[in-house]
Image: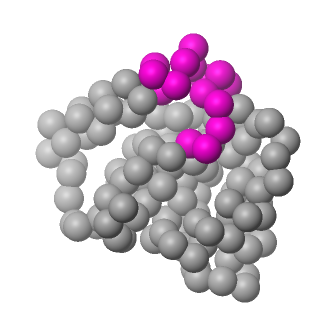
Amino acid sequence: MPSPLLVIVGGSDKHLELQSLARELCARVKGVICYGEVGNRVFRALAEERDTNAQPLIAWDKPFAKAVERALSMAAPGDHVLLSPAFASFDQFKSFEERGDTFSRLAKAWGERGERR
């Protein structure tokens, strides 16, 4: 993916080890917006990792729509926002397709409101 990149990550908590994910995100992205059932765990893992690595912006919003809105508002001209949940969608959606469709709809609505930078 082109840089700079803001990543939205979250979903159902499957109690996986998160330090490797946090390390890679801290090394490669401008910002991470965590959401959902696993959001707080990912946020804490990122906060621990960024003490010894790059300093990405991190935020946590439990509802998916709020996380998307925060990511879009954090993006500067030339930034890319990527939905890369890394976790199952079942905490807030019936399927990954529904989550992807919701992301597309929210991003399109944001742009139509003229809020895209």
Q: Which of the pair 69/87 is nearer the observer?
A: 87
The residue range painted magenta reads 85-99
Q: Residue at x 39, y 33 (%)?
A: 103
Q: Position of residue 86 (x, y in %)?
A: 61, 44
Magenta span dominant secondary structure:
loop
Q: Which of the pair 2/29 is nearer the observer?
A: 2
Is 8 inside the magenta-drawn segment?
Answer: no
Note whether residue 6 is visible.
yes
- Colouring rule applied to residues: one colour
Quadrant in the picture for residue 105: top left
Q: Residue at x 40, y 44 (%)?
A: 69
Q: Residue at x 77, y 36 (%)?
A: 13
Q: Position of residue 24 (x, y in %)?
A: 62, 68
Q: Position of residue 76 (x, y in %)?
A: 28, 66
In the rendered image, the quadrant that contains the N terminus is: bottom left
Q: Left or right of 54: which side holds 44?
A: right
State whether residue 88 is above or below residue 58. above
Note whether residue 36 is visible.
no
